[in-house]
Image: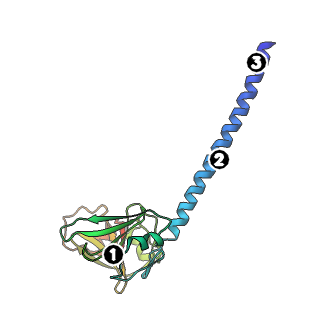
């Protein structure tokens, strides 16, 4: 009889315990979904247009001040760094993991470019995001032109400040000074960065 009571009590404790565990896992899932929704809402505030990025008005040569940038992007971590290249060093501001603002050099702390790259979820005003293919882009912005600079391939429209850097996809030909739209179309090329310049 004691054994039956013990088994019965253990069964009840296990049921209660599993209910608590289910509630905890539901709570943690709810919290995780909430955090993801808040992150998406923050990123949705950051749309790159021809003239703005989030609250930042975009104009070539506007001064970039760290305190001002932090005010404009309060929902994101902002860090100022020095970039090195074959040409002059330059300053760049990382806006969380979503974008990078660059200056032409360390002598001039003015806006040169905005880069949307890496794993960013930011889109531009045309609804174009990283990872889209030429076919996706062509539906939203038909008749894009192509240019190659230092073996980097860009799609752009005349008069637009926004350009798209493309990967070579599965292209297996030799490196070229100039690539064609056919190279992009036939190689499953995708956007690897969106650039305001």
Q: Which residue is mark 2?
A: 27
Mark closer to the chain start, 3 or 1: 3
Vertical placement of residue 195 versus 50, above or below = above
Q: Is residue 29 left or right of residue 84?
A: right
Q: In terms of depth relative to the viewer, which is nearer, 161 or 91?
A: 91
Quadrant showing the N terminus: top right
Q: Dividing the picture into quarters, in which one does residue 182 lie?
A: bottom left
Mark number displayed over residue 6: 3
Mark closer to the chain start, 1 or 2: 2
Q: Is residue 192 visible?
A: no
Mark 2 residue element: helix
Mark closer to the chain start, 2 or 3: 3
Q: Residue at the location (46% across, 68% down)?
A: 122
CA gap between label 2 and label 3 equals: 31 Å
The reply to whether callout 1 and callout 2 are in contact (CB within 8 Å) is: no
Answer few, some or many: residues within 10 Å of disc 1's Cα (few below 14, many 20 plus, some between 14 and 19).
many
Residue 166 location (% of width, % of height)? 32, 68
Answer few, some or many: residues within 10 Å of disc 3's Cα (few below 14, many 20 plus, some between 14 and 19).
few
Q: Is residue 43 visible?
A: yes
Mark 3 residue element: helix
Mark number displayed over residue 113: 1
Mark 1 residue element: strand
Residue 192 location (% of width, % of height)? 35, 65
Answer few, some or many: residues within 10 Å of disc 2's Cα (few below 14, many 20 plus, some between 14 and 19).
few
Q: Dividing the picture into quarters, in which one does residue 5 lie?
A: top right
The reply to whether callout 3 and callout 1 are in contact (CB within 8 Å) is: no
């Amino acid at each position: 009889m004691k054994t039956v009571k013990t088994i019965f009590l253990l069964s009840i404790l296990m049921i209660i315990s599993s209910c608590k565990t289910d509630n905890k896992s539901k709570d943690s899932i709810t919290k995780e979904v909430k955090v993801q929704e808040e992150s998406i809402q923050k990123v949705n505030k950051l749309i790159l247009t021809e003239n703005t990025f989030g609250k930042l008005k975009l104009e070539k040569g506007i001064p970039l001040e760290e305190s001002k940038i932090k005010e404009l992007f309060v929902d994101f971590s902002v860090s100022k760094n020095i970039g090195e290249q074959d040409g002059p060093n330059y300053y760049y501001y990382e806006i969380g993991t979503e974008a990078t603002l660059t200056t032409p050099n360390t002598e001039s702390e003015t806006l040169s470019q905005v880069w949307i790259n890496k794993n960013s979820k930011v889109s531009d005003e045309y609804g174009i995001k990283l990872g889209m293919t030429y076919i996706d882009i062509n539906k939203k912005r038909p008749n894009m032109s192509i240019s190659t600079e230092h073996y980097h391939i860009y799609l752009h429209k005349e008069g637009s400040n926004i350009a798209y850097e493309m990967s070579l996809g599965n292209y297996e030909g030799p490196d070229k000074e100039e690539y064609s739209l056919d190279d992009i179309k036939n190689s499953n090329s995708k956007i690897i960065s969106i650039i305001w310049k």
